[in-house]
Image: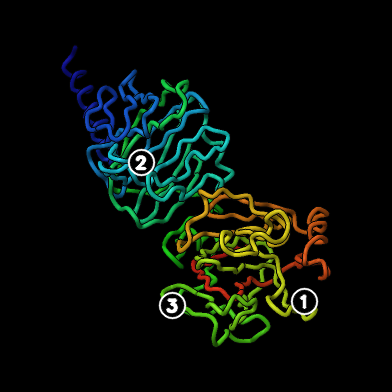
Amino acid sequence: MKKTTILFISGLLASIGLSAQQSGWTDLFDGKTLNGWKKLAGTADYKVEDGAIVGTTAFNSGNTFLVTEKEFGDFILEMDIRIEDTTSNSGVQVRSHYDPAGHEGKGLVYGCQLEVDPSSRRWSGGIYDEGRRDWLYPGSLNPAAQTAFKVGAYNHIRIECIGHSMKTWINKTAVAYLVDTVDQTGFIGLQVHAIGKQELAGEKVYFKNIRIQTSGLKPASFPKGIYVVGNIPNTLTDYEKANGWQLLFDGHSSAGWVGAYKETFPKGGWRIQDGIITVLASQGKEGGVGGDIVTTAEYSAFDLSFEFKLTPGANSGVKYFVRLAPEEKNSGSAIGLEYQVLDDTLHPDAKLGRDGDRTMASLYDLIKANKQKRFIHPMGQWNTGRVVVYPNNHVEHYLNGIKVLEYERSSAAYRELVAMSKYKIWKNFGEAQQGHILLQDHGNEVSFRSIKLRELK
């Protein structure tokens, strides 16, 4: 080979190496060995085959993780993942940790995980808090992304952890946006999920092209309209502000709120303190001492999100399309469609109505919320409610990220429900073009925060 040719090739290789270095990307997997990785918790197997890390399920094993020996803070992580069957499950841990004494001494990995879920639920790309808080960003919060993951093919995964924000993509489709302050550093891990049936032993999950960028981070663009789970109270991201979200409660004052049928905020019965607005206990009487409070503004189509915390046996509600019309004035609470806020275990209202339509997150006295116990946070902890009213009058209720009911406002089916309810005495109940948002005083102590709304066009 001529000397000039050798020099050219050497220069080309040096140029490629320099370009890779300047890009800031580092390979976490060399394609041949598991150097830089270690196995934690369960007994599933990891090995290298044809340039991929292959995890294989083992019967009677807990979740098994292959984690980086190094910890990371801010980064962009990319990799390709393949699952062969819809009965499998996997995930990618980020900023995670290990407790060797956890899980009854078998070891516990805990921290945020990008979910890989090929089941009919289709929550791949959602964010799960492994070994700790359960679901933080269920895939149901972004229905448009639920078809992004393909079974039996390699899927490209992207995770951005920058500051308090975590964003995820599956095959270039944006899936989840979480703002959380719990972990700022930790290891990265690959999961082989536990299995409960002998016949599922031997199922495989494949990982390859694993690389990370830790400097010169440039976040990818995130499309408009994706719901953000924000775990910093009473705070909006720049992304949310640009998408039209507004705080209805600023965290320190009653600005934007007045008493129902009043011109000012109640002088008693409500407390604003430490970023929380609380209706105080007053013997469980509807209307309480301070009475209901409503937004000064009215809304038509909107996406409303709020956090609430109950005391034992408490009852309250978040109402929408509240008109405050003289003909609708009620001796107790003002009239409107109600997202029920209730202690289902201790409050007697949970057993009244029809088929459980007065339980937590239900459309009060009209439609029962279809919810699982695992998605209800324990008493004394914050739950997140959400009501979405689309311009076409389709309405959805969510509890902690899970859709629990939906209906068509003003439809024949809706009017049949009203005709069987306590609301039948009010003409065209719940069918106003616009109305106020209301926090109910039902005489029990209930707290609210992070009340945010985006108007929909």
Residue 93 is tagged as 2
| Mark pair 1, 2: CA separation | 53 Å
Q: Which residue is nearer to you in this view: 210 or 143?
A: 143
> Dot 1, crowdedness within 10 Å: few (<14), some or many (≥20)?
some
**Residue denoted by label 1:** 328
Q: Give percent across and percent down for residue 293.
A: 61, 77
Q: Which residue is nearer to you in this view: 429 or 53?
A: 429
| Mark pair 1, 3: CA separation | 32 Å
Q: Amino acid at mark 2?
A: Gln
Quadrant occupied by the C terminus: bottom right
**Residue denoted by label 3:** 273
Q: Which mark sits nearer the N-terminus, 2 or 3?
A: 2
Question: Quarter-wise, where is residue 315 in the image?
Answer: bottom right
Give the side of residue 380 with respect to residue 32, left or right. right
Q: Is residue 2 above or below residue 326?
A: above
Q: Is residue 62 above or below residue 306?
A: above
**Residue that extends furthest to the top in the rendered view of this protein:** 1
Q: Amino acid at mark 3?
A: Gln
Give the side of residue 356 with respect to residue 281, left or right. right
Element class at badge 2: strand
